Image (cartoon, rainbow, N blue to C red):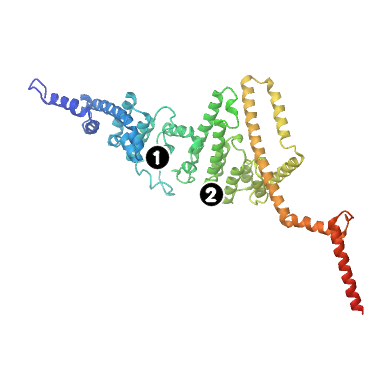
Amino acid sequence: MTEDYREENLIARTEIFLVEVVSPSLEKSVEVLSSCEALLPTAEEVGIPDRCIDAIARNVCQEQLVSGLSGVDCDSGSLELKDRCLEWWVEDLSVLSIDFYRRVIMAMGHVGVHIDNIIASLMHYAQVSLKGIGKLQIWNPAREYPCKGEKGQKTIVETLVSLLPPEKSSCIPLIFLFGILRIAIMVDAALACRLEIERRIAFRLEMVLLDDLLIPSVQTGDSLFDIDTVKRILIHFLQRIDQEENEDCGYESEGIDSPSHGALLKVGRLIDTYLAEIAPDPYLSLDKFTAIISVLPDYARVIDDGLYRAIDIYLKAHPMLSEQECKKLCKFVDCQKLSQEACNHAAQNDRLPVQMTVRVLYFEQLRLKNALSGSCGDTFVSQKISSGLTSAAMSPRDTYASLRRENRELKLEISRMRVRLSDLEKEQMFMKQGMMDKTGQGKTFLTSLSRGIGRFGIFGGPSGGKHHKSGRKSRTSECKTGRSRRYSVS
């Protein structure tokens, strides 16, 4: 096959074919690289896979430039046309084995292929190679752990996660991250792989929907939902919030509308909704339920109505809880952070322990007293000022942390006072409406009262025209009555 026997022998003809036919064409490069899978390790010794991988990366980069120039035409057309213009080569790469595909993606990153195109390729490859995994195991109480015969899929999942862009890019759809996370759990992927997906989700947890968090559990005899995974995601999110706040040395990020504070409040509402969704699960243990409740700090909730609703649903779905367990669960609800409607419901809720009902009634009475006296919130502010004065002996780092914590509490107290004010305004409107309904729209009562007063002539006098009229009418009626009497006597 060498040139020693004859010119343009097989090796030379193969080289010409690779240079002139395979390398300029992306489709031919993928086809030859896919054929090399059956020729290993001989193909690696010759170096054909490396040449095909480099050719694929270069051709993809050229296609990226061409698609960028024709982007105007794609934008003016339909979404399907745009996808075909930008990512027509994505489907070709899905025929490669995971090892060759990994090497192609790494080469594409080195030559400067855009992150969006790489992510689109990863998503399509995952959709093709992991299609239909674990469908029979989801929500099946008699399921078995599915990792036994899915070692190939496990390798694919771990490789795809390792190929994700290293930066925390927001261009990775959350639906893809949750999908790959569910598959990683089902095939028992490595812990580092699952933690990497969870960290990426936690970076944008405030944008997550409730349905995304409802991850089915694969453990036999456990709850229907994977509570531990959601708990780890929440812990990663809180670590991210603390890190962002520590990086900001000033107080600009501590405003009421700061991004970190707004994200924390959104996640607090999301977790309360999640707790209410998983609470009816009959297999959900009290320890797991309370574990995810205790992860969120107190300043992540302006009011505790959502948490109270979730706990009430759990108590209704688990009537066999002991009194001690009910007390343990209800301790997470701050009665001072319940709205008027929640307080009214809790005061009549037979499922709650007596101690919580007493606390609700006490704080409701205290709230009404403060509202009537106009001193609502003064005690809280004075306590914060006094606690701030005692922090002068702390170290600068501890002092800053204490001030930041007090600032958070003050902001939440302001938000709670706004909620209380709104409740009081609603109550005032209801009271006014009730008074008007009882008194016949208000005007009827006053009119009848004035007529009665005029009839008795209490304020009658020579200057009152109306009273003179009523007096003339009364005298006329008396005359008529007198005549009728005389007529009756006679």
> Of the numbered discs in the image, which one, if any, rests on residue 273?
none
The one of 24 and 195 positioned closer to us in this rendering = 24
The amino acid beneath tag 2 is Pro
**Numbered tag placed on residue 280 in the rendering:** 2
Q: For the N terminus, which image quadrant?
A: top left
- CB contact under 8 Å: marks 2 and 1: no
Residue 38 lies, in percent from the top left, at 22, 33
- Quarter of the image for residue 4 reads top left
Give the residue at x 33% y 40%.
Answer: 80
Residue behind mark 1: 183
* Outermost bottom residue: 490
**Whether residue 155 is visible:** no
Determine whether the residue tagged by mark 2 lies in a helix, strand or loop: loop
Of helix, strand and loop, which one carries label 1? helix
- 311 vs 113: above or below: below
Give the image location of residue 281, x and y in percent.
52, 48
Q: Disc count in the image?
A: 2
Quadrant, the C terminus? bottom right
Q: Is residue 330 above or below residue 410?
A: below
- Residue extending farthest to the left is 6
Q: Amino acid at mark 1?
A: Ile
Q: Earlier in the sequence, mark 2 or mark 1?
A: 1
